[in-house]
Image (spheres, rainbow, N blue to C red):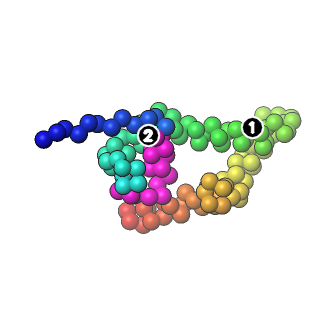
Amino acid sequence: MTERSRPTHAPAFKAKVALAAIKGETTLAELAQQFDVHPNQITAWKGQAVVHGATNVFVERLWRSVKYEEVYLRAYGTVVEAQAQIGRYLDIFNMKRPHSSLDAQTPEHAYFTRLSPQVAAA
């Protein structure tokens, strides 16, 4: 009996699979079949991505939006004014502004819609 060699996957491939798992749009079994890897491997890559900063990408994108769409366009008179205006921007960003990466949903709607079945099951 010949032993099957372990495949080595490029970091870009691992990141692609991990981000697909983080999005949660498909099950682990579906991802495993789609990418031809074991579900346990996907879980491991997902954990590594979260721990090692894939979520940092989303945070960086958020703050880039805040800077370029709010902060750099205004001259705040006080820290209190800056806090109020940035808070207003974040409310619009999360509750009113549709995002193309969320199929034209707001982050609030996408998060709570996905959470609802899980909360109901608990």
Measured Cα–Cα span from mark 2 to mark 1: 30 Å
Circle 1: element type = helix
Disc nearest the viewer among 2 and 1 = 2
Tell me residue 82's x, y (percent): 78, 38
Q: Amino acid type of disc 1?
A: Lys
Of the two numbered discs 2 and 1 on the same chain, state the one appearing first in sequence: 2
Q: Which mark is residue 109?
A: none
Q: Is residue 44 magenta?
A: no
Residue beneath the point at 31% across and 48% down: 38
Q: How busy is the neighbourhood of tag 1: few (under 14 within 10 Å), some, or many (20 plus)?
A: some
Magenta span: predominant SS is helix
Residue position marked by numbered label 1 in the rendering: 67
Boundaries of the magenta span:
13-31
* Left or right: 91 as drawn, with respect to 122: right
Residue beneath the point at 48% across and 50% down: 20
Whether residue 51 is visible, yes or no, is no
Question: Which one is nearer the viewer's eye here, 41 or 113?
Answer: 41
Tell me residue 66's x, y (percent): 72, 41
Circle 2: element type = helix
Q: Amino acid type of disc 2?
A: Lys
Residue position marked by numbered label 2 in the rendering: 14
